[in-house]
Amino acid sequence: MYPQEVFDEICEQAHERGLKVHLDGARIFNAAVATGRAVSELCRQADTVMFCLSKGLGAPAGRCWRGRRN
């Protein structure tokens, strides 16, 4: 896991160059607990995010994703 400041800088640099950023958030909820930050804060700079419900959450299966609306 990158420190939040590093991830934000990566996103800013990508966006300045017209690139989109995808966050594979397979364990984003674990990261939120470990860092004490909200999931929305951790992925706010990403254009798309996918997370898996079976990794760390104990759900049988499934994935969800979010895309940024422009």
Image (tube, helix red, strand yellow):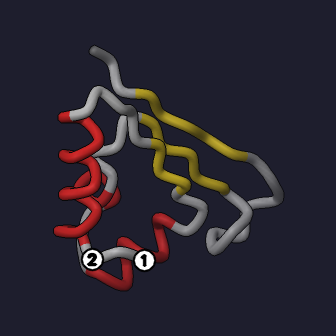
In which quadrant of the rendered view does residue 45 lie?
top left
Q: Residue furthest right?
A: 60
As displayed, is residue 11 above or below residue 37? above
| Residue 18, x across and y down, in percent | 29, 27
Answer left or right for 20 relative to 55.
left
Residue at x 35% of width, y 26% of height: 68
Total of numbered circles in the picture?
A: 2
| Pointers 2 and 1 in contact (C-beta within 8 Å) | yes
Estimate how packed mark 2 is, as few (under 14), some (14 to 19) or many (20 or more) residues with alpha carbons within 10 Å: few
Name the outermost residue toward the front: 17
Task: Looking at this view, name the residue that lies furthest to the top.
Answer: 70
**Frontmost residue, 7 versus 65:** 7
Per the model, the C-alpha gap separating discs 2 and 1 is: 7 Å
The secondary structure type at the circle numbered 2 is loop
User: Three-letter amino acid code at disc 2?
Assistant: Pro
Location of residue 31 (image quadrant): bottom left
Left or right of 56 in this view: 2: left
Mark 1: which amino acid? Met
Give me the residue at 47% from left, 51% from top.
23
Q: Nearer the viewer, residue 10 or 44?
A: 10
Give the residue at mark 2.
3
Q: Position of residue 62 (x, y in %)?
A: 75, 47
Mark 1 secondary-structure assignment: loop
* Neighbours of disc 1 within 10 Å: few (<14), some (14-19), many (20+): few
Please provide percent x and percent y for residue 44.
25, 46
Q: Name the residue: 48% across, 76% down.
A: 30
Task: Give the residue drawn at x 60%, y 61%.
Answer: 26
Residue wearing tag 1: 1
Q: Nearer the viewer, residue 19 or 47?
A: 19
Which numbered tag is attached to residue 22? none
Q: Which image quadrant: the N terminus? A: bottom left
